[in-house]
Amino acid sequence: ITQLYGPLTFLGFVYREVKHALIDIERMFKLLGVRAEVMDAPDAQALSASCPAVRFEALSFAYDGQRPILSGLSLEIPGGKTLAVVGPSGAGKSTLSRLLFRFYDVGQGAILIDGVDIRGLSQDTLRAHIGIVPQEAVLFNDSLYHNIAYAKPGACREEVIAAATAAHLRDFVAALPDGFDTQVGERGLKLSGGEKQRVAIARALLKNPPILIFDEATSSLDSRTEQAIQRALAEASANRTTLIIAHRLSTIVDADEIAVLDEGRVVERGRHADLLAQGGRYAEMWRLQRADVETAGAPTDKAWQS
Ligand code: ADP
Ligand code: MG
């Protein structure tokens, strides 16, 4: 499921690059096993927002039109602020990000950007405003440089390197035999989960979108990698409207708001300290993760698969 983002992001790139060529995007969606479910309205408007507020308003959604995944969910992210969403596997967290990117349209309710229903916006301009750092970033069989650069067609080398630096990839790149020109992907150097995630952050930074979605990886990262990712993320989310889907609660203690999702509903929301004081679901999750840290010496993702 989460791997959809990689091919789709790449597809977006291919599509932009060859948009006047004979590429049938519907067919490409089919080839990738994804249907283009969403169409532009005939009078679709261009989105142009620098610090957009995002509102999920009484959302209900089912992938199959039957089994409800989200049920009357409401949340807001004020422009430039960070909302963290936590909760058990299957709660509907990644679904929220897919709906915001408009891979699917909501059943009931609406998603509003600066008060405008995203169904009234052109998909091109909506997606140009959003950078997704997926749970599993996909690398192409190409140089590390091109794996980052594709996020912004026409980017100059300085911009690409600046994005990699901001994503805390410089030390990693410096240690590679051919630096940025090292071949990566299936037929090249294999990157660890944490390295791939920083490549995805570099892509998002190069794209420089006003809305950032970060779906944290569940795989255990060593603590140095985790710190590097956390710094990169904190810097990337400054002054951007950010949705963080968090598995490790330690990464979101500073979020402007935290929402706990379960079975497609918001069951608690507030800031870290408030939620701890409430002694509810969040406080319990926090206690469990702390216990893991203390016994194992490193955080685990027991409570947070996907
Ligand atoms: P989370 O990210 O909180 O773990 P998801 O939003 O990925 O949860 O998924 C919520 C529910 O929706 C899960 O039960 C999952 O099996 C289901 N689901 C996710 N993607 C699809 C899909 N493309 N088709 C059908 N069901 C899906
Ligand atoms: Mg998920």
Image: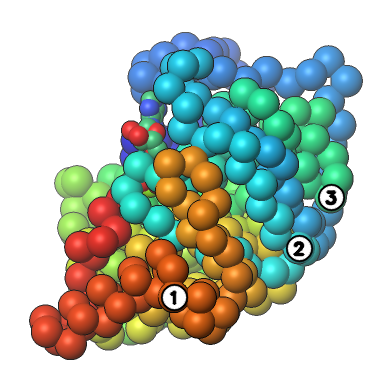
Callout 3 touching callout 1 (CB < 8 Å): no
Q: Residue 63's spot in the image, x, y percent?
A: 46, 23
First along the sequence among labels 2 and 3? 2
Q: Which of the 4 image quarters holds residue 211? A: bottom right
Query: What residue lies at 37% left-to-right and 22% top-to-bottom?
Result: 32
Which of the 4 image quadrants contains residue 281?
Answer: bottom left
Residue at mark 1: 279
The kind of residue on which mark 3 rests is Asp
Would you say residue 160 is visible in this rendering? no
The answer to whether 70 appears left or right of 42 in the picture is: left
Cβ(mark 2) to ligand 1 < 8 Å? no
Counting residues from the start of the chain, the first of labels 3 and 1 encountered is: 3
Q: Where is mark 2, residue-wise? A: 78
Camera-near label (2 vs 1) is 1
Residue sitting at x 59%, y 31%: 60
Residue 206 rendering spot, x and y as whole percentages:
58, 62
Question: Vertical placement of 104 versus 266: above or below?
Answer: above
**SS for dot 1:** loop
For mark 3, what is the residue? 114
User: Between 4 and 90, which is closer to the camera in this rendering?
Assistant: 90
Residue at the extreme left of the image, as rendered = 296
| Residues marked 2 and 1 touching at CB (< 8 Å) | no
Residue occupying the far front of the picture: 279
* Label 1, ligand 1: CB separation under 8 Å: no
